[in-house]
């Protein structure tokens, strides 16, 4: 674990203020992850079909499936980069869980927010994770 402090820390008020920017990005991230999973499933189905009996899948179609997956992966990576550039830590793509680095009583902690929550209302220690969430 790095002993360097985070590049940015948030107070609970700053984290809640940032939700106006963060919430739409996280919504986009969750949707992009879902689209990536769907593209992966289409690619897996094609691969199983080819492994079985060739499945009548043209090489061009297979290439298009691969390109779609790559495009969707790039979109997701771009959204994650945007969120991280704001100073947040992405914890779960599927549920939209992010942490805001913070300091509480002189100790580094994480303010925890998940898509669907109205506000940033929980925190946990650096090692505690979601299961260790406590009300602010």
Image (spheres, rainbow, N blue to C red):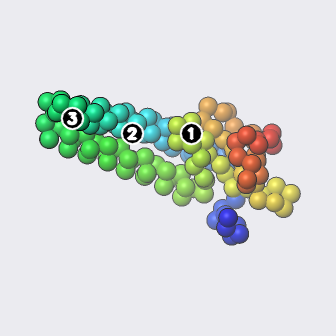
Q: Is 57 situated above or below 29? A: above
Say which mark, if any, is on residue 70: none
Quarter of the figure with the C terminus = top right
First in residue order: circle 3 vs circle 2? 2
Q: Is residue 83 left or right of residue 54?
A: right
Horizontal and vertical percent for residue 86?
57, 56
Residue 96 or residue 87, whichever sits in front: 96
| Residue tagged 3 | 50
- Residue sitting at 37 percent across and 50 percent down? 74
| Residue tagged 2 | 36
Label pair 1/3, CB-CB below 8 angstroms: no
What SS does tag 3 mark?
A: helix
Q: Quadrant of residue 58?
A: top left
Q: Is 55 situated above or below 85? A: above
Label 1 Cα neighbours within 10 Å, binned few <14 / some 14-19 / many ≥20: many
Q: Is 132 situated above or below 109? A: above
What is the C-alpha distance between the residues marked 1 and 3?
35 Å
Eye-nearest disc, 3 or 2: 3
The reply to whether residue 12 is in sight is no
| Residue tagged 1 | 96
- Residue sitting at 35 percent across and 33 percent down? 41
């Amino acid at each position: 674990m790095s002993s360097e402090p985070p590049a940015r820390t948030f107070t609970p008020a700053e984290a809640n203020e940032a939700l106006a920017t963060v919430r739409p990005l996280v919504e986009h991230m969750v949707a992009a992850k879902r689209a990536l999973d769907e593209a992966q499933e289409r690619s897996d189905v094609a691969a199983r079909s080819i492994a079985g009996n060739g499945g009548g899948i043209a090489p061009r179609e297979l290439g298009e499936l691969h390109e779609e997956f790559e495009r969707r992966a790039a979109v997701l990576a771009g959204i994650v980069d945007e969120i991280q550039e704001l100073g947040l830590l992405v914890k779960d793509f599927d549920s939209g869980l992010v942490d805001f680095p913070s300091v509480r009583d002189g100790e580094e902690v994480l303010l925890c927010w998940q898509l669907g929550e109205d506000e940033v209302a929980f925190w946990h220690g650096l090692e505690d994770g979601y299961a260790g969430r406590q009300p602010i």
